[in-house]
Image (cartoon, rainbow, N blue to C red):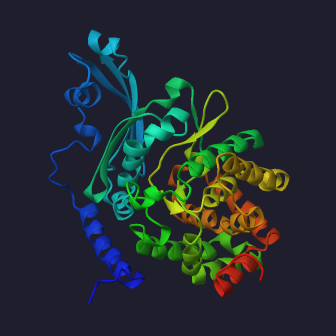
């Protein structure tokens, strides 16, 4: 009897992989003949990875000028090269993302294969995206088992690129630039045959690594959020929506996986966008990407960055800017069906806001999550997201019969 790749078989494989990934993440150390933490970085290693293609280039000094430890270890370094390195314009300032010391933080990195995904983006897609300013310049990216990795990026501050925080206030004009950047990225890979070839690592939502663990994680966070003071103050409509979403989210995930796929940033909130001096936008922190419907990134961003007043005045306009940019790049969609999907996709950002508010905020301002909860709660009622959720679960479609 031939082996058939059924959802059940795949789910079993994912569960087995998650057990292995968890064990690797919590191991105090791995025997790797590689650099994957900041304290392993030396001038000799940097000379090799940054200057090996330049004859006689040598790093004279390398200084860690500061950083912080969070979900990943992040540090800025200044470099001084010899004359050969200077003549070749090797980087003088760089930014590291590397393995965190905390084993608890490595768990999510390992289970979701987050560093592996980001390394794929910089190693395989930068030739298409980096020249357009849609992602930063990357000098080196390697990922290893157990959430271990090291990535060297350009120091964006050296180019006067603004890296936003979740609590920032942005203008509708800049939100427009983010919508355009998202659509340009998404159009590049919309329904691409590469998903069955060199981009097979961009997995669908229901088949991505760590998906089973992530579902349990969100279920626990929804429960804790509803028990919190912020959750208790929600309108009854929104509380019931969260309970329905917790019960039926897998059916909706499967529905979303049926939509035309592209590469999804996956964590496209305000804190992961770049603002260039000319006003254009790009993205970094590609550790949560997957294959999905492009409107997910748009909804996730707008729900994370705009307050109720801004959404009331500009939400549909920004949706149209994104859709118009898709169409200008050869992607045609049913605009009204896409609008309904966009409205339902607000539940994805709601999950992340609830998660952050119950897990310390991951370094972002609590006011940002409170703003998001208010905005999403308001728009969920305005767009009757509960009705859209019920329709998808009952019929498998978002449009009325």
Q: Quadrant of the N terminus?
A: bottom left
Q: As rendered, which of 208 and 20 lies closer to the eye? A: 208
Q: Position of residue 14 (x, y in %)?
A: 35, 74
- Give the quadrant of residue 141: top left
Q: As rendered, which of 190 and 10 lies closer to the eye? A: 190
Q: Is residue 52 left or right of residue 320?
A: left
Point 19% across, 27% down: residue: 44
Q: Position of residue 186 (x, y in %)?
A: 58, 51
Q: Is residue 310 left or right of residue 228?
A: right
Work out which residue is located at the far bottom of the displayed protein and give it.
1
- The answer to whether residue 266 shows anywhere in this view is no
Point 39% across, 29% down: residue: 94
Work out which residue is located at the far right of the displayed protein and give it.
313
Q: Position of residue 297 (x, y in %)?
A: 61, 56
Q: Is residue 265 above or below residue 224?
A: above
Q: Quadrant of the C terminus?
A: bottom right
């Amino acid at each position: 009897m031939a082996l058939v790749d059924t959802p059940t078989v795949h789910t079993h494989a994912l569960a087995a992989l998650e057990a292995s990934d968890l064990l690797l993440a919590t191991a105090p150390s791995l025997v790797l003949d590689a650099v994957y933490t900041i304290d392993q970085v030396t001038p000799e290693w940097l000379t090799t990875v940054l200057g090996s293609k330049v004859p006689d280039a040598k790093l004279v000094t390398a200084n860690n000028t500061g950083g912080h430890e969070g979900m990943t270890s992040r540090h800025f370094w200044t470099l001084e090269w010899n004359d050969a390195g200077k003549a070749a314009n090797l980087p003088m300032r760089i930014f590291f993302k590397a393995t965190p010391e905390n084993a608890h933080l490595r768990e999510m990195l390992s289970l979701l294969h987050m560093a592996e995904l980001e390394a794929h983006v910089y190693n395989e897609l930068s030739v298409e995206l980096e020249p357009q300013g849609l992602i930063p310049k990357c000098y080196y990216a390697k990922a290893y088992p157990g959430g271990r990795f090291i990535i060297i990026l350009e120091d964006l501050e050296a180019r006067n690129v603004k890296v936003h925080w979740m609590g920032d206030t942005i203008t509708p004009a800049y939100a427009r630039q983010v919508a355009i950047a998202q659509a340009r990225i998404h159009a590049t890979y919309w329904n691409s045959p590469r998903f069955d070839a060199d981009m097979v690592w961009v997995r669908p939502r229901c088949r991505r690594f760590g998906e089973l663990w992530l579902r349990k994680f969100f279920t626990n966070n929804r429960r804790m959020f509803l028990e919190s003071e912020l959750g208790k103050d929600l309108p009854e409509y929104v509380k019931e929506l969260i309970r329905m979403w917790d019960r039926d989210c897998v059916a909706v995930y499967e529905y979303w996986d049926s939509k035309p796929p592209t590469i999804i940033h996956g964590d496209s909130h305000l804190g992961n966008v770049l603002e260039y001096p000319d006003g254009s936008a790009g993205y970094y922190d590609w550790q949560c990407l997957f294959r999905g419907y492009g409107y997910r990134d748009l909804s996730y961003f707008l729900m994370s960055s705009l307050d109720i007043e801004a959404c009331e005045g500009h939400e549909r306009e920004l949706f149209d800017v994104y859709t118009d940019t898709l169409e200008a790049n050869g992607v045609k969609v049913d605009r009204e069906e896409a609008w309904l999907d966009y409205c339902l996709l607000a539940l994805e950002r709601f999950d992340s806001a609830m998660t952050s508010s119950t897990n310390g905020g991951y370094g972002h301002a609590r006011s940002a999550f409170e703003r998001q909860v208010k905005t999403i709660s308001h728009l969920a009622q305005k767009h009757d997201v509960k009705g859209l959720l019920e329709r998808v679960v009952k019929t498998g479609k978002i449009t009325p019969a």
